[in-house]
Amino acid sequence: MKEKCISAIVFAAVTLTLVGCNQENQSDSSSHKQHLSKVVQVETRPVTARTLTEQVTGYGVVKSHNSVALKSLQTSQITAIYFEAGQAVKKGQLLVQFDPAAAKAKVARDQAQLNATKQAWLRQKELVNKGVVARSTYDESESDYKQALAQLEQDESQLTELAIKAPFDGVISQTDFHVGDVVTVGNTLATLYTPDQLSIEYQLPAAQKQNYHLDQTVTVYSELTPSEHAQGTVSYVSPNIAMGLVTLKAKLPDAKKFSPGQNVKVVQQTRQLLQQVTIPTSSLITNIQGAQVFIVVNNKARLRDVKVGQYYDGYVQILSGLAVGDQLVINGQNYLRTDQKVEATLAQQPTTQSSQPATAGTK
């Protein structure tokens, strides 16, 4: 009798549990149906296609066809700097003056020594012509005079080295030195270059070498101030590959903001991609399933898996999963479920279709 009672209690408990689960499932199903029946306001925009221009990013350095590093030939103190960074200078213009006091004193002493030896040599010349002194005495005085002349010329040359002048017309770079600094032999004071003959030597990934051609457009950006940029054209593509990179060169016809030796970022436009499907990046949903978007079909939301390509300027390239003309949800997609009823408002198209190219590059 006791065993029958226990079995009845267990049966009743299981029955109640199953009834509760059934009611809960019915409640969840009812809630889901209610959610799907709720109309959600969304904004849509027809999917469009456009022509993209691929571009590849690399890094390089500015070079000049005609440039010279102005170096210190002596260890001396700077007493004056007569230029500013980016200034146009003329051939022969004084740029940097070092302390000339000691060198001038040496030249003055040499000049006095030269005058004395010259007078002695001229007297000995007279005397040797008269046969009063031996020829060896005359030769010795002549040697003293020539040595004094050579010493004067040497010290005058060293005095000249203390005044750094422009060897040709050009633009001067900035200097890291200041008045009062003591500069040692070989220190580079600044670089003088011709601004209309600048070029960029840079490297790009070899994987896309077949897309690199002469006369392609490049945009050069300063690494220190990215807002400063200039455009040029490819003038050289190396046939060789080193460490997975290809070396290229580009001419810069207008590069007043750049100077030789400056590190730059180079963006090269390569091939065009016709009729590429693109959507706003903000409409893309990314999760563990991958990339997805919502579209509207017959006033219902439909979730689509998409394969994305390059990202650029607020848009993303769609390689598969969408077609031109699909009504893409661009606002309100975060609150949708598939098959949910929606009330779609057509969003205004952008005034200009951006064609900023997709980007790939070196790190």
Image (spheres, helix red, strand yellow):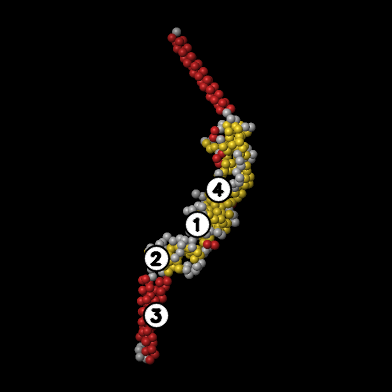
**Tag 2: amino acid:** Ile
Task: Provide the residue designation for mark 4.
Answer: 359
Task: Please identify, in this view, whether the residue under mark 3 or under mark 4 is nearer the observer.
Answer: 4
Looking at the image, tell me whether mark 2 or mark 3 is earlier in sequence order.
2
| Mark-to-mark CA distance, 2 and 4 | 48 Å
Task: Please identify, in this view, whether the residue under mark 2 or under mark 4 is nearer the observer.
Answer: 2
Percent position (x, y) of residue 325? 64, 39
Q: Secondary structure at mark 3?
A: helix
User: Looking at the image, how many numbered discs can be counted on the residues?
Assistant: 4
Task: Provide the residue designation for mark 2.
Answer: 78
Q: Secondary structure at mark 2?
A: strand
- Decide if residue 196 is in sight here: yes
Percent position (x, y) of residue 204? 53, 52
Question: Which class describes the residues within 10 Å of circle 4: few (<14), some (14-19), or many (20+)?
Answer: some
**Tag 4: amino acid:** Thr
Taking the image as shown, residue 309 lies to the left or right of residue 105, namely right
**Tag 3: amino acid:** Lys
Q: Residue 61, which numbered label?
A: 1
